Amino acid sequence: MAKRNSKAEMKIFYDIAEELYQSKRTFNEIYNLPLRYWKNKELFIYEENGKGEVIKYSDLDAFVKGYASFFKKRINSQRGEYIALKLVNSPKWVYTFYGLLMAGFNVLLINPILRKEDAERLIFEANAKGIITDDKETYSVQTIALDDVKIESATFEPDWANEVAFSTSGTTGDSRVYVYTADNLVEQIYSAYCMPDTTVDIMYTEKFGKLRLLAIVPFAHIFGFVAVFLWYSFFGACIVFPNSISSNDIQYFSKTYKISHLYGVPLLFDSLAKSFKQTVSKESPKKQALIEKMMKYNNGKISDTEAGIVTTKFFQNIVKNKILGKEIRYCIAGGSALSKETLETINGIGYPLYNGYGMTEIGVTSVELSPKVSQRNRGSIGKPLTNVEYKIENKELLVKTKQMHSYRFVNQEKIPAQVDSNGYFHTGDIAEIDGNGYAFIHGKVKEVIITANGENIYPEELENNFKNLPYVSNLAIIEHLNKVTLVLELNRKLEQEEVATLEKEIIRANDSLPTSMRVEATLLSLENIPLNASLKIKRFELKDRLNKNPEQFIALSRNENISYQGIDEDELNPIIDQVIEIFSNNSGIEKEKITRSSHFIIDLGGDSFTYMSMLSEVESTFNTPIPTETIGKINTPLEVAIYIYKNKN
């Protein structure tokens, strides 16, 4: 491989960034500059009928103009009005996004996993006049199904709109719509200008290998939109679209298409780390010792001499080829904190894992970039990017940047971005900045638990200490009855011995903490812990559920099997087995890999159409109708089985 010279090799990236920054700063430039700079490069890879298809930068314009022409003729709205886009990631998402803007419509991005009623609320907030979707549902506004969109010859001059709106679901379940202008997004693109000063791996020319990203974070999410779609399509990389976000597809596409960059939420990397450890535990003691030595070496804990053979590419590639392949050079987690154990596990495999930070309100504002593994493993979110300022006030992170949203919608009214008198946005995140300028996030201001002795407990930080508990698919720390309470969601029914093991592991994890930070009570939730569309815990909803329906939570006790109160499990279990088979039929995931708590969309990669298909099969199999108000509220085999049980008895 050629010798790396960061500044020299990055000149082309500096050139396109400077040209954009000095331009008219419209979507016209954001869209057209990459087509001129990178026209012969790969832009997208996807599979159709089991065969890999490639779209080059030079191919994009014909698709986008064809879509724009269709929208111009078919959408019954005025220029500058909002049209919602609710689609899973695919090349057609991009054609639709740019096609709407080119046709003169502002775009409201909606996460494809949101329920219809939640999407309707966002449509109302932004006063959107239509929606393009791959749902099989009709909305209260003009609804155009993606399958009905046809490429038409472009017979009009592009008339670019200027705004894109993102939505967020807070921990209370409330949603907000934040609007970014093209000028804001130009600032966001330019914020990457400082990256080559620290690393040569986050962006590079083809001289040093293929740069391919796997598009698993929804583009409707600010993280997926900026860190995967916007930055990398502008700077000439290739985006690979998997068929789903199931672990099987992530592994298959990573290996088959030699993914170099993998960006996702912490849950992805937590799951990858846990799966890797389970796989290693089944190896012989000799192999386990070699892998442990490799991980220590990759984490900088032992020298080359001490590590010996495990330092070789040959050995490391043997391990990597059993996971996601040997090409991965850069991983970024965004959305919430990474645990130290996950950082050390993924970095120990040899997949460099970094933390990033951003919010729907301010975009992506920092990424840990250090090539030093010791720095990555500290869990820093890095230093602020170009034209971004951080400061700490009363332990809260404040951010000042021109890339933040211009205004937000509240009941269709435009509210300017809320900043203080010095222009800083108050993030609500508890943070610190060390002497070298690296920032660390510790939790949310509103979620801080203040104990009886005045200690501050940050739930996200504390949760990381319990993430590797056995038999647990999700967990949350909340305050309940003035106690720091650990709420667990189990992946299956536990026998007495397993309950004892779980309790022992909780005690072990608890004992490793300072006395003032320890969990004081543990509850098991008989329902899934509520998550928002960004896979963050809805703590307020969980606390409200605990207060209103305490019977859905039971105390952990080694003296009994964990069961479902008021339900005959001998009758429930056969129903669960049948439902898992139906989940398998409709998701394409082997039934052996589906647990009682597998979420059909989040865990198994289903979409709205396959979800409805699954429920339809449930209805016919059990001869039990599922009313409209229940759709979207039963998502796991356990939830579906309990619904069937209660409505058949």
Image (cartoon, helix red, strand yellow):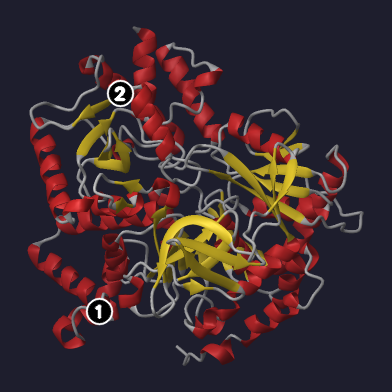
Q: Which residue is mark 2?
A: 550
Q: Nearer the viewer, mark 2 or mark 1?
A: 2
- What amino acid is labelled 2 in the image? Pro
- Judged from the image, the secondary structure of the residue bearing numbered disc 2 is helix
**Whole-percent x and y of residue 3?**
46, 92
Q: Quadrant of the C terminus?
A: top left
**Whole-percent x and y of residue 258?**
45, 67
Label 2 crowd bin: few (<14), some (14–19), many (20+), radius 10 Å: few
Q: Is residue 552 visible?
A: yes
- What amino acid is labelled 1 in the image? Gly
**Whole-percent x and y of residue 515?**
16, 53
Q: Which residue is mark 1?
A: 300
Residue at 42% in and 63% down:
431
Q: Are marks 2 and 1 in contact (CB under 8 Å)?
A: no
Q: Quadrant of the N terminus?
A: bottom left
Front-most of residues 331 and 604: 331
- Earlier along the polypeptide chain: callout 2 or callout 1? 1
Quadrant housing residue 32: bottom right
Up the image or down, 29 lies above or below 220; here it is below
User: Farthest residue in the right direction?
Assistant: 156
